[in-house]
Image (cartoon, rainbow, N blue to C red):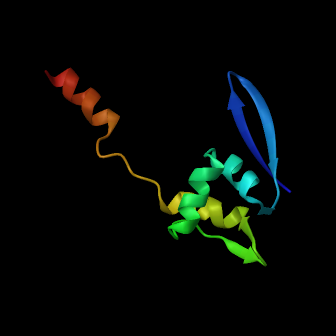
């Protein structure tokens, strides 16, 4: 199992997710509902594998998929702050 650390209100918690995840585990990992994950699978938007009738997800694939779907900011906060000081 791989660990993912996150901070909540100044306290650190560790959440363990297996390398191969079920629908429920993957939905929890992505912090979305199982229903929405099924929608992503049906639409072919998220990487998955089938073992018989079972749908499974590799944690590494989901992590990389998230990275590929990052939306970069259109504006830099520093530019806006600098513009405010120039006024």
Q: Residue at x 41, y 52 (%)?
A: 71
* Quarter of the N terminus within the rendering: bottom right
Q: Residue furthest bottom?
A: 52
**Left or right: residue 24 compared with residue 42:** right
Q: Residue furthest left?
A: 87
* Quarter of the C terminus within the rendering: top left
Counting from the top left corner in percent of width and height, residue 44 is at 52, 71
Q: Please tell me in which quadrant of the rendered image residue 53 appears.
A: bottom right
In the image shown, does 58 or 25 lie closer to the viewer?
25
In the image shown, does 27 or 73 lie closer to the viewer?
27
In the image shown, does 38 or 26 lie closer to the viewer?
38
**Left or right: residue 42 compared with residue 49:** left
Counting from the top left corner in percent of width and height, residue 36 is at 57, 52
Q: Residue at x 58, y 65 (%)?
A: 41
Rendered position, 77 above or below 27: above
Q: Residue at x 60, y 46 (%)?
A: 32
Q: Residue at x 63, y 44 (%)?
A: 31
Counting from the top left corner in percent of width and height, residue 57 is at 71, 65
Q: Residue furthest right?
A: 1
Counting from the top left corner in percent of width and height, residue 26 is at 70, 55
The mark tally for this picture is 0
Rendered position, 43 above or below 3: below
Q: Please tell me in which quadrant of the rendered image residue 11 appears.
A: top right
């Amino acid at each position: 199992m791989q660990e993912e650390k996150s901070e909540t209100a100044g306290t650190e918690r560790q959440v363990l997710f297996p390398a191969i995840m079920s629908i429920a585990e993957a939905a929890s990992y992505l912090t979305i509902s199982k229903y929405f994950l099924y929608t992503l699978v049906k639409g072919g938007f998220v990487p998955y594998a089938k073992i018989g009738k079972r749908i499974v997800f590799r944690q590494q694939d989901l992590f990389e998929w998230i990275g590929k779907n990052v939306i970069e900011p259109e504006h830099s906060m520093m530019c806006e702050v600098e513009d405010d000081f120039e006024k």
